[in-house]
Image: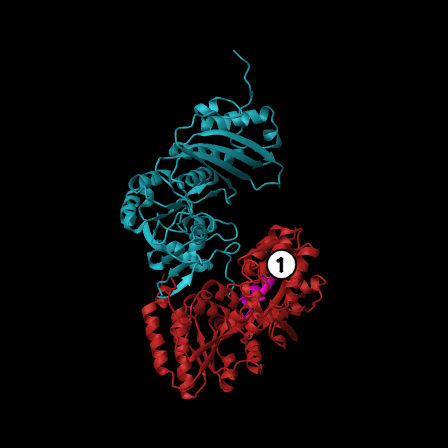
Chain colours: A cyan, B red
Amino acid sequence: MSRRLFPQPLDLANGRVDMSHGAGGRAMAQLVSELFAAAFENDYLAQGNDAAMMSPPPGRLVMSTDGYVISPLFFPGGDIGSLAVHGTVNDIAMAGARPLWLSAGFIIEEGFPLADLARIVEFMAGACKACGVPLVTGDTKVVERGKGDGLFITTTGVGVVPEGLHIAGDAIRPGDAVLVSGTLGDHGIAVLSKRENLDFDTDIVSDSAPLHDLVAAMVAAVPEIHTLRDPTRGGVAATLNELANQSGVGLILQEAALPIRPAVRGACEMLGIDPLGVANEGKLLAFCPAERAERLLAVMRAHPLGRDSAIIGRAVEDDRRLVQMETEFGGARVVEWLNGEQLPRIC
Amino acid sequence: MKYASEFRDGALARKVAAAIATDCEPGRAYTLMEFCGGHTHTIARYGLEDLLPPAVRLVHGPGCPVCVLPVGRIDTAVELARDHGVMLCTYGDMVRVPGSGRESLLKAKAAGADVRMVWSTLDALRLARENPDRQVVFFAIGFETTTPPTALALKQAKAENLKNFSVFCNHVMTPPAMRAVLDDGEAIPLQGIVAPGHVSTVIGTAPYQPFADRGQAMVVAGFEPLDLLQAIAMLVRQINEGRPRVENAYVRALTPEGNPKARAVIAETLTLRPSFEWRGLGTLPDSALRIADAYADFDAERRFAVPYRAVPDPKSCACADIVRGRKRPEDCKLFGTACTPDTPIGSCMVSGEGACAAHWLYGRHRDPSQRRLSA
């Protein structure tokens, strides 16, 4: 019988990450083997090389990377691990692409409980499995106590775009319909409600979810889709301003058409923030020719992640590239980028 | 959303606006000041000026707590955070207001100062308890609305004998500011004032009587669009009748006597400053509060040697004229060029209640002759 490589198993109940877990020695090998490799198990990881080797399918490849620094690490409806999978899968999907592979880099602060790390890795592996996207390579670093905030994760994804699709941020045309795949602001409010210095009671949970399956159904039914984007940081307000600039159009929203949960509306009212500026992690905005909008809406509503989809506005010719909103009150207002973080009201 | 959406009914708003137009007497001008920045924000956000007849003119008032704090006070806060090594707790908007040389608490934080954004005084007290080896200073600002929480925090700190907690007190008062605006010989003559709703829940309506006695129509209003239109309708009627008085259009939140308990806590912990510099209004006597001698141990200005230095506003910045209603944001040559919410020069561009921020967010693309979406 061969000598066991690691005489003691990791203490996943009470142990903590220490500097040796990132030092390249036996402790690091044990962490990688017993925690990461075990959870993410797949043929690419099993190659055991520094670089995973894959054979790309025919078609155009897309690639995207994103860092996750969310606080708290566990929040209603999700955690940093599954979010790191969903976020990057969604960035790939917004090109109309099918996600193929993921990589992940973990920066862990010394003293981080192994039990929390194990939970996060488990959620993350579960998310990979549910998405059908293997994590093919990864990296772990440990930084001294006080030099990180528990755990940061960076994921990179590669995907392939089916033939015949040309989905891009500069492709919106005047006359296009603007659709959203569901209620706005759920993620941001769920996370805010658990911030240490805020802590209000709400049933709102994050909408963190992978959107590639919804996108696959959408592009199959309506390949004429011009643009897709997920309104994450900065919310719908930032994303629409970004796209209006990129495409050189104006956008006009109907306030009455915006799907917003009453609880989110109420929390925003209380905090003095605009739901259009609050982050989402499982929603997308879609732009397509107006005559295809009803068909696209039907397909979206038929998918479990698009049940509350709505047509919320239209693109228009506008050299100023403004995003405006026809309000329920009966006027119009500009929907601006947010400056800095949304701040609480004081009076 | 009960008590909010009912007061944002556009069809009803148009009816009230039409009634105001009917009430306006031909050839008569109705120049009204909305004192409070919260009102300014609602007016801009809902485009209320578009609904009103041309005879009704609204002038923005100085009731934005962030806007009226002068550069010298920002400098002192920055100095406390940067040079005295304290943990400085502040309400959100204050972190971006530029002081001398465009230094701000946000920039001081980036350079290593310990600046914490808090949502209430309770957060500042908690930070003091959790960090017994640090000096925690609460940067208190605001009109009478935000004064009671500061007063309660002082009482609580004393009760707990918190040695590391103090307050940098910059609370200001509404009636002296109103008086200063009306006494300003260069300002636009006003016929009436929309008085602040939340301030009045504390001070009540009696403090406005002297202004009615001076001939100003006075109506206290809430912060939804219908609240404001209702108040304007009442002001127009008062002016027509030639019988200026104090009326309450915010009955769902406000009783005429205000909140005597809150005033008692303020009276116990805070006391009048002989004089205080305001941005735009200059140095006004008996217009602000400092910490009472019985609570001197919790006074940051006494604990740390931070003498007040008055600093002039940035050159060309029109905030001073804007807070006293002499100018509108679009009259400032820095507006939208050098001064934007991302690169603010004056305080009016920072606060959500500032006239410039409101105009930037909601008003600047509006074509007043068209009153519709331009695209």
Which residue: 32% across, 71% down?
B12
Going by the numbered disc 1, the residue's amino acid type is Ser
Q: Quadrant of residue A275?
A: bottom left
Looking at the image, residue B355 sits to the left or right of residue A61; the answer is right
Q: Residue B145 colored magenta?
A: yes
Asked whether the viewer can see residue B267, the reply is yes
Please state which of residues A341 and A166 is positioned toward the viewer in this rendering. A166
Estimate the x, y position of residue A302 in percent, counting from the top left: 28, 43
**Count of numbered tags:** 1
Residue bearing the label numbered 1: B104
Please state which of residues A99 and A106 is positioned toward the viewer in this rendering. A99
Please state which of residues B84 and A277 is positioned toward the viewer in this rendering. A277
Which residue: 71% across, 63% down?
B306
Estimate the x, y position of residue B79 in percent, counting from the top left: 68, 59
Chain letter of mark 1 equals B
Residue B112 sits above or below residue B244 on the image: above
Which residue: 40% across, 59% down?
A324
Picture quarter with the C terminus of chain B: bottom left
Q: Residue B283 colored magenta?
A: no
Please state which of residues A181 and A293 is positioned toward the viewer in this rendering. A293
Residue A136 sits above or below residue B212 on the image: above
Please report the bounds of the magenta region as a residue range: B137-153
Looking at the image, residue B44 sits to the left or right of residue A20; the answer is left
